[in-house]
């Protein structure tokens, strides 16, 4: 059954002694009871203390090993997350000739969309297949034509970007965007992004990061268990002791900083795990409120005669008629004869500036709107899911939110460094104690 509790044995022995005394010497019953009662209370205190200490020791080991191994990964995820908080401005800063274009002050209107895309398609490599056109976020950026191409390093498919000046139709350049199996080939922004959620391990790395995220969740929770103060010691648990020794200062910094950062870290971990495992996340959210699935099953009706798709300018006109407000983020092209145009045109006040909740699925031949996803039809589950990504990146609250995420990404590093220092300090103390004991 395992080791017995020594304090429990002590209590049993005291109780048995009381019984023997009351049987053999009934006239002195009152005396041993008075004398032995303090020992019974002491035994209970010892039992409680040993139980608390053993529990604390257990949680301390769980926290230690999760922190040492999963915490090291958390440092990488946190630092890359800090950079990604400003990924677009950073990308523009590093690649101005590729991404930015001079604004035509005399004629600030774009060329027709079909003209822009045609210029990009003309510059595609022979095995390149256009998949979507991404619209610029402001007037000084180029359009991005995304296309797929077979990788030279394996059987996987690469995603490339071709940049087009919307005022002149000139192709300003091309770059590889994503090679999931060879992260080192990606541009800096996407290298950081893949490192953030795959550790550079390809598609399988997403599962690794997801399970490490679950471990980090327990690491933060065990940290809160260890932080939890005894009665009357709450103030000490929330502050750093003044004029403390370096050892005590490091301990207080780890403890108090961990507590104050716990809420942010817990949210970032939970939202990150959701983004890694969205199917499971949707199922969990769906327990409380339905989550609307994307209309990925929409299909165009293939005509019997000429199979001529409508133009992109017509797609844009249809979208503008349905959603007059907002700015375009992308238009996805049909993948095959039954494919559809996939339009993302968010409302002005949408919380996710990178993506688009409001979307249209349009028949490529007839121009019929097969499905529309808009804010008025959202469920509570849809709203919850919609908020997760922009909160995770900080963009839900604009520049201030991005700054919060920037600093939040440094939290794992601070906790990891102070935690390792604390571990080394205790390890050194144990070795010194062992040496002293051996010397007698």
Image (cartoon, rainbow, N blue to C red):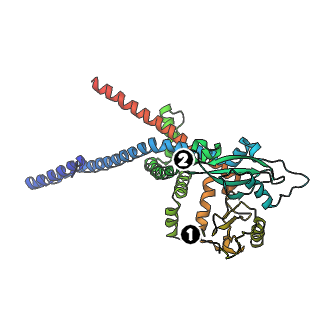
Identity of the residue drawn at 72% across and 63% down = 349
Residue 203's spot in the image, x, y percent? 52, 51
Identity of the residue drawn at 65% across and 52% down = 127
The residue most toward the top is: 439
- The answer to which image quadrant residue 365 occupies is bottom right
The residue most toward the right is: 106
* Among the two numbered marks 1 and 2 on one chain, the one whose residue lies closer to the N terminus: 2
* Location of residue 99 with respect to 437 vertically, above or below: below
Identity of the residue drawn at 43% across and 33% down = 424
Identity of the residue drawn at 74% across and 62% down = 328
Report the residue marked by disc 1: 291
Q: Which mark is residue 154?
A: 2
Q: Which mark is residue 126?
A: none
Residue toward you, 124 or 193 = 124
Asked whether residue 206 appears in the rendered view, the answer is yes
Residue 261's spot in the image, x, y percent? 55, 48
- The answer to which image quadrant residue 354 occupies is bottom right
Counting every numbered tag in the picture gives 2
Q: As drawn, is 230 to the left or to the right of 298?
A: left
Residues at discs 1 and 2 in contact (Cβ within 8 Å): no
Q: As drawn, is 326 to the left or to the right of 431?
A: right
């Amino acid at each position: 059954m395992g080791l017995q509790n020594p304090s429990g044995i002590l209590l049993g022995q005291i109780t048995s002694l009381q019984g023997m005394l009351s049987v053999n010497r009934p006239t002195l019953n009152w005396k041993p009871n008075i004398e032995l009662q303090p020992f019974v209370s002491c035994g209970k205190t010892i039992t409680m203390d040993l139980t608390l200490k053993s529990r604390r020791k257990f949680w301390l080991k769980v926290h230690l090993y999760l922190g040492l191994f999963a915490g090291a990964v958390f440092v990488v995820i946190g630092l890359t997350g800090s950079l990604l908080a400003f990924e677009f401005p950073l990308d523009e800063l590093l690649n101005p000739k590729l991404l930015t274009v001079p604004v035509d002050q005399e004629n600030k209107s774009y060329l027709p969309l079909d003209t822009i895309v045609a210029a990009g398609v003309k510059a595609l490599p022979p095995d390149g297949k256009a998949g979507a056109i991404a619209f610029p976020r402001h007037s000084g950026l180029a359009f991005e034509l995304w296309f797929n191409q077979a990788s030279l390093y394996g059987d996987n498919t690469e995603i490339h970007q071709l940049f087009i000046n919307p005022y002149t139709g000139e192709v300003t350049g091309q770059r590889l965007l994503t090679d999931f199996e060879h992260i080192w080939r990606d541009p800096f922004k996407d290298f950081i992004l893949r490192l953030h959620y795959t550790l550079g391990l390809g598609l399988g790395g997403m599962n690794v990061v997801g399970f490490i995220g679950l471990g980090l969740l327990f690491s933060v929770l065990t940290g809160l268990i260890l932080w939890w103060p005894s009665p009357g010691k709450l103030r000490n648990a929330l502050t750093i002791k003044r004029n403390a020794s370096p050892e005590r200062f490091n301990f207080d910094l780890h403890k108090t900083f961990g507590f104050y950062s716990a809420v942010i870290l817990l949210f970032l971990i939970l939202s990150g795990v959701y983004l890694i495992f969205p199917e499971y996340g949707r199922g969990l959210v769906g327990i409380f409120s339905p989550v609307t699935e994307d209309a990925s099953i929409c299909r165009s009706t293939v005509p019997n005669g000429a199979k001529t798709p409508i133009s992109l300018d017509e797609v844009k006109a249809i979208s503008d008629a349905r959603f007059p407000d907002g700015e375009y983020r992308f238009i996805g092209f049909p993948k095959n004869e039954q494919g559809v145009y996939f339009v993302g045109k968010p409302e002005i006040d949408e919380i996710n500036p990178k993506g688009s909740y409001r979307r249209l699925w349009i028949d490529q031949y007839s121009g019929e709107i097969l499905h529309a996803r808009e804010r008025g039809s959202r469920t509570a589950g849809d709203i919850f899911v919609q908020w997760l990504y922009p909160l995770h990146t900080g963009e839900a609250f604009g520049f201030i939110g991005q700054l919060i995420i920037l600093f939040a990404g440094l939290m794992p590093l601070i906790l990891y460094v102070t935690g390792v220092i604390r571990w080394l300090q205790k390890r050194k103390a144990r070795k010194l104690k062992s040496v002293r004991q051996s010397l007698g």
